[in-house]
Image (cartoon, grey):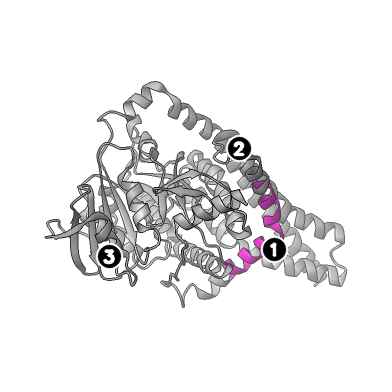
Amino acid sequence: MSELIRVTDVVILAYFLALNTFYALLLVLSIPEIWEQTRLAEDEDFQRLMQSDALPPITILVPAHNESATIEASVTAILTLEYRNFEVVVVNDGSKDDTLERLRHAFELYEVPRTYPETLSTCPVLAVYRSRTRTRLLVIDKENGGKADSLNAAINASRFPLVIAVDADTLIEPDALLRLTRPFLLGRQIAAVGGTVRVANGCTVKDGRVNDARVPRRFLPGIQVVEYLRAFLFGRLGWNRLGGSLVISGAFGLFRKEYLHAIGGYQTRSVVEDMDLVIRLHRHLRQHKIRYEIPFIPDPVAWTEVPESGRILARQRERWHRGLIAAMWQYKGMLFNPRYGRVGLIAMPFFTFGEMIAPLIEVMGYIVTALGLALGVVNTSFALLFLLVAWGYGMLLSLWAVVLEEVSFRRYGRLGDLIRLLCYGTLETFGYRQRTVWWRLKAFFTVFTLRQRWGEMTRKGFEDAGKQAAGSTSS
């Protein structure tokens, strides 16, 4: 028994050492990616090209379910983006609040006949509306079918070859589309592009724009700023050098519509439709031997509201991990399969053995280490080493993500914001990390019973967040 505990603890320690070392590798690989993307963004010839008619036309897909608090600001901001040729398709997915009425009043909607083929199967569409004041806007009212179903309905109605899925609670920066289409102008075979999502809580928002980026003073939204920096700035950037990530954020991702039709659109059975879509996209393109890239671009930015209560955040993280488990199981045939190249040999193993089972291993590590200490099998030095590798390494990576943000994009210009980020990056390990482990662990017990359940996300609205930030500044 003593030997089993000792060996198990060593194996778990080696697991966390390997996992965090891989995260560190992603951090290192992200540095040349940031340099390359910054150089392209600042190139004068390239900037002139992005202002020309060479830009491909885009359809922006906006699913909305009970988004009354943010829908006007979000759609207004989208309609005024700096881009020559685009349209916006908003789908009211059976909202129980006054989302549709707010859209009808704000944009003077009138009903029009359906003239497009419904290639992808969706829940029944009740009506289609055009705007008298905004010719680029189309609004679809349909029965509730979930986010994936709404996106499929929007794809059916779209007219352009590129589509971008944007959450209704998302505020896109004015030049984000110009930056997001950059890879398509380089003559590369681009299947999809992901952009950066940042936390809007605590920021000052005016006319649908974040005009003063602030780090929230409240702990839960503030610590999520660090999580998002870590996930996007070096997590997904590093994957550009390893064959492409399996995730493009559902709040901000651009896709070739022909490929979405080829794979049957979004899967309505998945609660992480963004990951499911990208995995199926990789699988389809690899199986048909189509050359492609799915890069992540760091400088196009969209801002989103994140949960501010532990109850809602718990549901979100449990759902994310539940969806990850279901996706890894459903596409297990790609795991270690050389047919799928680096996706099958690197990405799928990492998300299966690094992301998916990490909470199980961590909880097991706590139990075995505590049991070993109680029985005298594990000494205090080894227990501290375990915590240093499991917690300290991760804390260091969070702090490096903050440093990477400060030396590259510097969205948060105040010293107080930087100090708060560093504090959140340090405090994340003590208490918050253990809560997220528990939330993710619960997903292993709910993956089959709650496979399609999303849960509600209560929102304050961007204007309220902006006023709150302004009030905090003046106090």
Residue visible at 34% across and 66% down?
A: 268
Badge 1 amino acid:
Gly
* Quadrant of the image occupied by residue 401: top right
Q: Is residue 213 visible?
A: yes
User: Mark 1 — residue?
Assistant: 431
Badge 3 amino acid:
Glu
User: Mark 3 — residue?
Assistant: 101
| Mark 3 or 2: the one toward you | 3
> What's the magenta region?
421-441
Residue 158: give x, y in percent of width and height: 22, 51
| Mark 1 or 2: the one toward you | 2
Which one is in front, 360 or 212?
A: 212
* Crowd around label 2: few <14 · some 14–19 · many ≥20 (10 Å): some
Indicate which disc, 1 or 2, sits on the residue closer to the N terminus.
Answer: 2
| Mark 3 or 1: the one toward you | 3
User: Mark 2 — residue?
Assistant: 406
* Quadrant of the image occupied by residue 405: top right
Residue 344 within the magenta-colored segment of the rendering: no
Q: Determine whether the residue tagged by mark 1 lies in a helix, strand or loop.
A: helix
Residue 352: give x, y in percent of width and height: 53, 58
Residue 430 within the magenta-colored segment of the rendering: yes
Q: CA distance from mark 1 to mark 2?
A: 26 Å
Which one is in front, 207 or 385?
A: 207
Q: CA distance from mark 3 to mark 2?
A: 42 Å
